[in-house]
Image (spheres, rainbow, N blue to C red):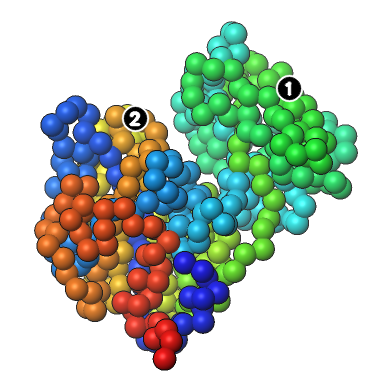
Amino acid sequence: MNLNFLKSLVRPADSRILLLVIDGLGGLPMNAGEPSELEKARTPNLDDLARHGICGLHRPVGAGITPGSGPGHLALFGYDPLEYRIGRGVLSALGVDFELRPGDVAARGNFCTVDDQGIVTDRRAGRISTEKNRELCALLRKAKLDGAELFVETVKEHRFLFVLRGEGLYAAVSDTDPQVTGSDPEEARALEAEAETSASLVRRFVEHAGRSLSGSHPANMVLLRGFASLPQWPRLPDVTGMRAAAAASYPMYRGVAKLVGMELLEAGGDLDGRLDALRGGWDEHEYFFLHVKQPDSAGEDGDFERKVAEIEAVDARIPELRRLEPDVLIVTGDHSTPAKLRYHSWHPVPAVLWSARCRPDPVTRFSERECLAGALGPAFSAVDLLPLALANAGRLEKFGA
């Protein structure tokens, strides 16, 4: 969907849209003939939404493409992730309220574990505590990088923010994160000639990290990915004419929301805090993004039963969202994270849209198999959710005479 075209059709209305993103929602059976995590979960409230709404399976990017969390969320917000590309570094920076400047080069960092041969054995260093992260970031800041100012900031658990600031820096640098265990960290390379200075600085930082963290366990090395600089994009409030707000705790998701112009609500660390923030901002905003991370984490850990339980925990809170009386309520995920694969996957993601204006389809249960028969289709584009939400909220004019 072209955002400028969509903006030309927007009209004001007294209505509210709520988008609930259950991170990593889609799954797979652990064995043939068994249910997926969502199919096994007891979800009476999501099933009720499905019976009275319209359902389908969306593709965040395209057929067979496994999306990162950034592209997955951008698509849900209406931004074609193939057109609006952004590295994870910018999202991490915005998520921790780092004052990123034009020309800065930012990357998302992971503390990781390597063995005596330098092979990555745990990409997340056992999900170390945020307190330990702060101690290690203090060591990393001591790196001397001639020609650039270095910033290393704690994000959460094993995640940190890496930023270079200086003249002539470019973000076209390859990741050092191999994305798998059992492999050496990659060497940072310039993807374009003008980024060689940036790549050289990254390599020197990684060398410093290896020396500084050699006595630390399990976090004895770093991985960097998603090098990026701050873009200038259309803002969601300008496109939709709606005051937009985000109730999210994890910095990355706060970052992507801030990037498209949402106000960040003070959401606290758990779902109770995010629901309180949502209720507190309900009168001042019209578009709301509510994020739940735990199902994705369980999927990445390969914990099928925990993911089932986390989905059920979200389902139990659906009545609280409905009591807010949104005019449009959408529930979906940004990507699939099957516990069987322990990682994001390319599988289309279940979605349900409810409004008083929708034409209910035959779906009676919110699951991958049933959503195949939904009115939204078995493989629709995630970017279509924004115009569908606006239409169901009475916020789009007729196109043409």
> Residue at left 21%, top 38%?
36
Can residue 352 be spotted in the picture? Answer: no
Q: Position of residue 185 (x, y in %)?
A: 61, 22
Amino acid type at mark 2 = Leu
> Residue at left 18%, top 56%?
373
CA neighbours of label 1 inside 10 A, class few (<14), some (14 to 19), many (20+):
some
Amino acid type at mark 1 = Glu
Can residue 64 be spotted in the picture? Answer: yes
- Left or right, 206 with respect to 113, comes to right
Query: Hey, which quadrant is residue 207 in on the image?
Result: top right
> Residue at left 85%, top 46%?
168
CA neighbours of label 2 inside 10 A, class few (<14), some (14 to 19), many (20+):
some
Could you give the CA–CA distance between mark 1 and mark 2, rounded to whole angstroms? 32 Å
Could you say which disc has been placed on residue 123 in the image? none
Along the polypeptide, which appears first: circle 1 or circle 2? 1
Residue corresponding to mark 1: 207
Is label 1 or label 2 in front? 2
> Residue at left 16%, top 65%?
361
In front here: 146 or 229?
A: 229
Counting every numbered tag in the picture gives 2
In front here: 201 or 174?
A: 174
Residue corresponding to mark 2: 341
* Quadrant into which the C terminus falls: bottom left
Q: Position of residue 117 (x, y in %)?
A: 60, 8
- Left or right, 304 with respect to 386, comes to left
In front here: 346 or 270?
A: 346
Q: Secondary structure at mark 2?
A: loop
Residue farthest front in this picture = 401
| Vertical placement of residue 282 versus 74, above or below | below
